[in-house]
Image (cartoon, grey):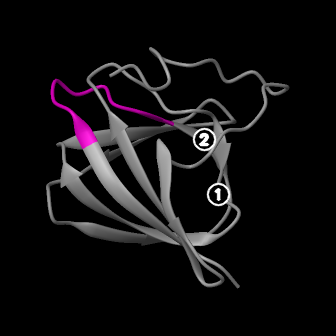
Amino acid sequence: MGHFGKFPSMAADEPLGGVGTRLVFENERVKVWELFLEPGEGSARHEHTLDYLFCVLEGESVDADTADGQTIRIPVEPGTTFFIGRGGIETAVNRSAVRFREILVELKD
């Protein structure tokens, strides 16, 4: 399933996309996204404007390629959950040999 393509560009003028592959639920308090990336696939370049948490369903790592050119490698295992504060523009990239899948919940103010 080609969602966003291989290693997307990080051009500063590139429009921002969503924080996940698809929005699965939204109400006045939360937005729930699914993100899935096949090996070598990257997400849309996006900005985290809300605090969020994500729960890993599949995968062993995911990279966050930041707008300033850095790469943050996040080792994961299914069942782990992370809370992350808002801020930052990034592209999620799966540089591992297995599919990465998560549920991401944005917390609205």
Q: Disc 1 on helix, strand or loop?
A: loop
Q: Give the range drawn in magenta.
A: 92-100
Q: Residue at x 73, y 38 (%)?
A: 16
Q: In this view, does 46 lie above or below 78?
A: above
Q: In which quarter of the image is the N terminus?
A: top left
Taking 53 as reference, is 46 left or right? right
Q: Distance between the residues labelled 1 and 2?
A: 8 Å
Find residue 78 and report its horizontal and vertical position in percent: 14, 57
Pointer 1 with pointer 2, Cβ within 8 A: yes
Q: What residue type is labelled 2?
A: Glu
Q: Is residue 49 magenta?
A: no
The disc labelled 1 sits on which kind of residue? His
Which one is nearer the viewer's eye here, 61 or 34? Answer: 34
Quadrant location of the C terminus? bottom right
Which image quarter: residue 95?
A: top left
* Residue at image mark 1: 48
Viewer-proximal residue, 101 or 63? 101
Residue 68 spot, x, y in % from top left: 69, 35
Residue 63 to residue 12: above or below: below
How busy is the neighbourhood of tag 1: few (under 14 within 10 Å), some, or many (20 plus)?
A: some
- Residue 65: percent from left, percent from top: 53, 34
Is 89 on the left-hand or right-hand side of 79?
Answer: right
Judging from the image, what secondary structure is the residue with disc 2 in?
A: strand
Percent x, y of residue 24: 46, 59
**Mark on residue 90?**
2
Vertical position of residue 3 compared to residue 105: above or below: above
Left-right relation of 38 to 30: left
Answer with the quarter of the image where residue 39 lies: top left
